[in-house]
Amino acid sequence: MALSKEQVLDVLRAVEVPGGGTAVSRDLLRALAVQDGVVRFVLEGAPQAELEAMRPVLEAAVKALPGVASVTIVVPAGPPRGMGGTAQQVRGPAIGGHPKPQSGPQPVPGVARIIAVGSGKGGVGKSTVSSNLAVALSRAGKRVGLLDADIYGPSQPRMMGATQRPSSPDGQTILPLKAHGVALMSVGLMLKEDEAVIWRGPMLMGAMQQMLFQVKWDEFGPLDVLLIDLPPGTGDVQLTLCQKTKLDGTIVVSTPQDVALLDAKKAIDMFRRLDAPVLGLIENMSSYICANCGHEAHPFGQGGVEAEAARLGLPFLGALPLDLDVRLAGDAGTPAAAGEGAAAEAYAALAEALIARGAV
């Protein structure tokens, strides 16, 4: 019989915690999730020291339940100075160990430069650009890492052909995988491919903090650059990233049409407000060449991103084609940039442009 939320609640109702009462009777329990033996919940509503003292007591009690594979308990911390959000600490093998509290932006050990790839909206091929750019930079001689920060919709494991679960030799440090010459980490590597992540903000931000600071990014040698594939929008992940570590640059991906550019401009405004330098814009799906007749078409328009970059006084990093081979390669787990042909050449040119600018 599968483990249920009610079974976990029954245990939590019976365990007295430091400060008196139980976590349930004192209404300290939030966002309880139970799936395939993995138990996750948030503790909040009491002083920080009290919550921290409760955590090991509750963790031990829940772990004693038959059918429990792992327990993750999140304790939100106080708001960092200058930000409206909250930082948090996560413990448990579902993601990693217990991250050390951070005050202000911190360097990521083993990483020389950090570049985030964002879009402001979904559907413009940002993840495809991230994976292919990472591979192209690796082929150009750079040591590259790729962090999939799209917690709710991680796609990099599929695109990079990575299926192995990351290991943790000491229960604290997480070892990245290596795919196509790139060090890779994604929450998708911890889950079944079709399993949804149903987390509140504190758990999401805790996972993000762990994937930044507890992953041994220099497992295969010190990285020249860590590319971070951001989720769509301008929310928790972006704020946490800029709050916890200093970005050396950001790249904004958009398709040429006005609707996509509206959201790309919001992403640019967000990065500027967060003091994250914008290295430039990429126009994705810029053109399509018919495989039968060779005719070049522009289904999303052409030149819109380049014109917007000029208007904003930002570099235009290049245009990438809409190419069926890119989609097929991503679905097959071998990015187009890892092979030969027009798509690989386009990404190689993009990588060389970034290297020439000193961005990497």
Image (cartoon, grey):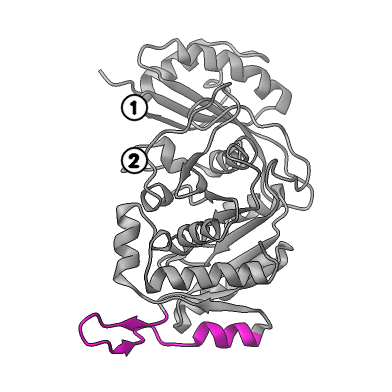
Q: Residues within 10 Å of mark 1 (few under 14, many from 20)?
A: few
Which corner quadrant holds the C terminus? bottom right
Please give the name of the residue rendered at 38% of the width and 53% of the height, measured from the top-left corner: 159
The image quadrant that residue 164 belongs to is top left
Position of 360 relative to 260 (above/below): above
Part of the protein shown in magenta: 286-311
Q: Residue furthest left?
A: 292
Q: CA distance from mark 1 to mark 2?
A: 10 Å
Relative placement, left or right, of 218 versus 67 is: right
Residue 108 in the image: state x and y as whole percent: 69, 44
Q: Which residue is mark 1?
A: 36
Q: Nearer the viewer, residue 134 or 65?
A: 134
Q: Amino acid at mark 1?
A: Asp
Residue 14 in the image: state x and y as whole percent: 49, 10
Position of 350 relative to 75 (above/below): below
Position of 225 relative to 322 (above/below): above
Please give the name of the residue rendered at 38% of the width and 25% of the height, measured from the top-left corner: 5
Relative placement, left or right, of 120 versus 300 is: right
Residue 295 in the image: state x and y as whole percent: 28, 89
Q: Nearer the viewer, residue 25 or 172?
A: 172
Please give the name of the residue rendered at 39% of the width and 74% of the height, measured from the top-left corner: 342
State yes or no: discs 1 and 2 in contact (Cβ < 8 Å). Answer: yes
On residue 195, which mark appears? 2
The answer to which of marks 1 and 2 sits earlier in the sequence is: 1
Q: Nearer the viewer, residue 167 or 250?
A: 167
Q: Secondary structure at mark 1?
A: loop
Q: Amino acid at mark 2?
A: Glu
Residue 94 shown in magenta: no
Q: Residues within 10 Å of mark 2 (few under 14, many from 20)?
A: few
Which corner quadrant holds the N terminus? top left
